[in-house]
């Protein structure tokens, strides 16, 4: 399960890269179906931008990004958005399955 962190136009980006890898690892622990996480960190003038791209099993592709004045804040918000999308997909999949022993009525089809 590779984690890629790309930093663009950043000087001394090691702390931000380390923080993004920690958040990526937490995301992969929470959602075991995640296969690949790519975090792109970018700085333009005073704007700090973080983009999270997640690949998961069953052709799931999620993207989340955030722009703010602080890189740590941008990383946090982008990962929160990605987690929200993954949670929504996971609940959508689990809610639509018929459980063993459950009776399906004609109106439920």
Image (tube, helix red, strand yellow):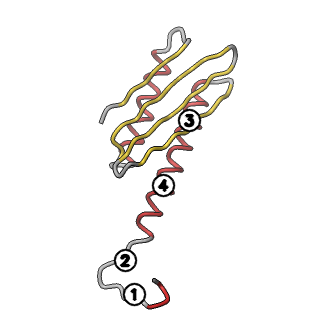
- Residue 81: quadrant of the picture: top right
Residue topped by disc 3 = 76
Q: Residue 94's spot in the image, x, y percent?
A: 41, 66
Which comes before the other along the chain, label 4 or label 2?
4
Measure the C-alpha gap from mark 2 to mark 1.
Answer: 8 Å
Quadrant showing the N terminus: top left
Q: Residue 12's spot in the image, x, y percent?
A: 50, 10
Q: Are marks 1 and 4 in contact (CB under 8 Å)?
A: no
Q: Are marks 2 and 1 in contact (CB under 8 Å)?
A: yes
Residue topped by disc 1 = 104
In front: label 1 or label 4 = 1
**In front here: 109 or 24?**
109
Which comes before the other along the chain, label 1 or label 3?
3
Which comes before the other along the chain, label 4 or label 3?
3
Classed neighbour count for the residue bearing mark 2: other residues with Cα under 10 Å, few (<14), some (14–19), many (≥20): few
Q: Can you tell which mark lies on residue 87?
A: 4
In front: label 1 or label 3 = 1
Q: Are marks 3 and 2 in contact (CB under 8 Å)?
A: no
- Residue 90: quadrant of the picture: bottom left
């Amino acid at each position: 399960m590779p984690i890629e962190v790309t930093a663009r136009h950043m000087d001394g980006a090691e702390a931000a890269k380390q923080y993004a890898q920690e958040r990526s690892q937490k995301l992969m622990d929470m959602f075991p179906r995640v296969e690949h996480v790519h975090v792109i960190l970018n700085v333009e003038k005073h704007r700090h931008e973080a983009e999270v791209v997640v690949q998961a099993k069953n052709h799931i592709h999620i993207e989340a990004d955030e722009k703010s004045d602080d890189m740590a804040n941008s990383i946090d918000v982008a990962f929160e958005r990605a987690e929200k999308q993954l949670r929504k997909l996971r609940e959508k999949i689990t809610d639509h399955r018929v459980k063993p022993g459950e009776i399906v009525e004609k109106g439920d089809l």
